[in-house]
Image: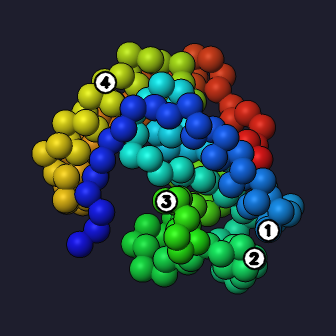
Amino acid sequence: MSDPIVIVPYDPRWPERFRKLGTALREALGEMALRIDHVGSTAVPGLAAKPIIDVQISVAALEPLHTYRIPLEKAGFVFCAGNPDLSKRYFREPPGDRRTHIHVRCRGSWSEQGALLFRDYLRVHEDDARAYAVLKYRLAEEYRDDRATYTEGKASFIWGIMVRAHTWHQEVGWQPGPSDA
């Protein structure tokens, strides 16, 4: 059985945890990592979240895998070969470290850009971020031990945000800013 789903209030230490992690990842990957970004709920100031730092590493191509897998494993990260999302490669924290999810995606891909757009949209649309937090608290309470159903429960809300984020990005000319690390 996996750990129960727990949503906690925003922790102002999350950005610093990412900075340390981002620095270590930059040292391990060098210029192979075209971008290293803090994504997910812990990257949105004020947003309640599972206390898991999500990192997106953008690379030129997902294959050959060994070009980034070897340096990440040397840095202690664990490759998760069974990830069903073929638009990325997934790694976890070194054993015994705080929970971390590393998503390796192709630079410029829809999944890479979507993660950045979702984060940036929520950073400037506090009402939507608050509504997302309310939903996550409710789903975590209802599906504490069922990650799949918890995740499915967020899907329609996330897609609604993405529709609004798409309109917003056209209105403001959104482009991803510089890499976070």
Amino acid type assigned to the residue bearing label 1 in the image = Ala
Q: Disc 4 designates what residue?
A: 131
How many numbered callouts? 4
Amino acid type assigned to the residue bearing label 3 in the image = Arg
Asked if residue 131 is positioned above or below residue 63 in the image, the reply reads above
Residue 28 image label: 1
Pick the front one: 20 or 113: 20
Asked if marks 1 and 2 touch (Cβ < 8 Å), the reply is yes
Pick the front one: 111 or 75: 75
Asked if residue 176 is positioned above or below residue 123 in the image, the reply reads below
Amino acid type assigned to the residue bearing label 4 in the image = Ala
| Crowding near the residue tagged with mark 2, few <14, some 14–19, many ≥20 C-alpha atoms within 10 Å | some
Q: CA distance from mark 4 to mark 3?
A: 25 Å
> Which element is circle 3 on?
loop
Q: CA distance from mark 4 to mark 2?
A: 39 Å
Residue visible at 73% across and 79% down in the picture: 74
| Crowding near the residue tagged with mark 3, few <14, some 14–19, many ≥20 C-alpha atoms within 10 Å | some
Q: CA distance from mark 1 to mark 2?
A: 6 Å
Pick the front one: 21 or 83: 21
First-in-chain label (3 vs 1): 1
Amino acid type assigned to the residue bearing label 2 in the image = Pro
Q: Position of residue 156 (x, y in %)?
A: 26, 39
Q: Disc 2 designates what residue?
A: 71
Asked if marks 3 and 2 touch (Cβ < 8 Å), the reply is no
- Res 35 visible: no
Asked if residue 98 is positioned above or below residue 141 in the image, the reply reads below
Q: CA distance from mark 3 to mark 2?
A: 19 Å
